[in-house]
Image (cartoon, rainbow, N blue to C red):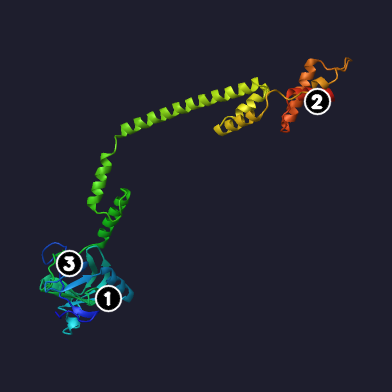
Amino acid sequence: MTKPASKPDLLTSTGLALEVVSASASGADAFKAPEWVQIMPRGKVTCRDGRTFKFEPDRLVERFEAEGIDIPIDLDHGISNGTSPDAVGWIKELQARAEGLFARVEWLESGVEVLRARTRRFLSPTFHHTEEGVTTWLHSVALVAAPALSMAALAHADPTSQQQQDISMKGIAEALGLNPEADEAACLSAFNTFKSGTVAKAVHEETLAKLEATTSELNGLKKAQHDKAVSEVLEAALAAKKITPAQKDSYAALCATDEGFEQVKALLKATADGLAHSGLDEQKAPATDGDALDPAALSAKASAYQAEQASKGITVDIIAAVNHVKETGT
């Protein structure tokens, strides 16, 4: 293991080591080399020899993917210190996780034999770093016997199951109205709070039924009050001769909504009391010859004239209709 670099971004065999453990059943026949292994932790770490490094997995993954070159795994840093050029495995993929930097390894037979024999149980990365100890580039990884960093044994990890678990937890957190990064404890606390505020289904349905009945009753009362107010306004308008009985239904239709009712009230307020002058006093007495219309015929023709004008969108009151019939005879 070399001394710490005196210049930024120089290659250093750190001696940082993580134990490689197979996740398969015990026994030589059942041995299977782990596909995913942890290369380094995340964040600031102090080694057993006192050196301090800051590991940034995301930066290392970004550079690895940009270069597109597999990273070798050797024995005892043989590639970096020049003692052996041979690799015993190749890193095909890097992944930055919350715990640190993970690698998917394609082991060569020589590497599998070393793992099976357990003569070198730890991984030790060789990397570039700045003067402040920030990692910038992963050069290689070695299988070693003596670690420089105290770390708990780590079995290989399946990224698919981990990603699925993370996605599932994020979905639960969002459904509970929490930050997607909320941990399991926060989700459980939020769920318990939510659960304590819920009510039984039967109580919920009964409350809804009562609410609907109350709403219907209130709507009925509101309509009755509205109709009563409309009737009072129109009856007053009739008494003041601002409208005719024939016009009452039309005005009532306009009052169907609160807005329409307000408009009708404003219109009636601006209308003077008493019906408009009919002009009957200026009319000549009806003829007394045989062509004179009897009251029944006059009324029938006046009604027909009103209907004809209404079909054209013109409203004619009965007095004007009678006058028209008398003047025109039709």
Quadrant location of residue 3?
bottom left
The answer to the question of whether label 1 and label 2 lie on touching residues, with beta carbons closer than 8 A, is no
- Per the image, the residue denoted by label 1 is 70
Measured along the vertical axis of the image, is residue 64 above or below residue 248? below
Secondary structure under tag 2 reads helix
The location of residue 69, given as percent across then percent down, is 29, 77
* Residue 231 shown left or right of residue 8 in the figure: right
Of pointers 1 and 2, the one earlier in the residue sequence: 1
Of pointers 3 and 2, the one earlier in the residue sequence: 3
Quadrant location of residue 315?
top right
Looking at the picture, tell me which residue is in the foreground, 235 or 130.
235
Whole-number angstrom distance, CA of label 3 to CA of label 2: 111 Å
Measured along the vertical axis of the image, is residue 124 above or below residue 253? below
Q: Give the residue type at disc 2.
A: His
Label ID, residue 32? 3
* Residue 174 shown left or right of residue 273 in the figure: left
The location of residue 83, given as percent across then percent down, is 16, 84
* Residue 268 shown left or right of residue 287 in the figure: left
Looking at the picture, tell me which residue is in the foreground, 308 or 317.
317
Q: Give the residue type at disc 1.
A: Asp
Label ID, residue 324? 2
The location of residue 270, given as percent across then percent down, is 65, 30
The answer to the question of whether label 1 and label 3 lie on touching residues, with beta carbons closer than 8 A, is no
* Residue 65 shown left or right of residue 21 in the figure: right
Secondary structure under tag 3 reads loop
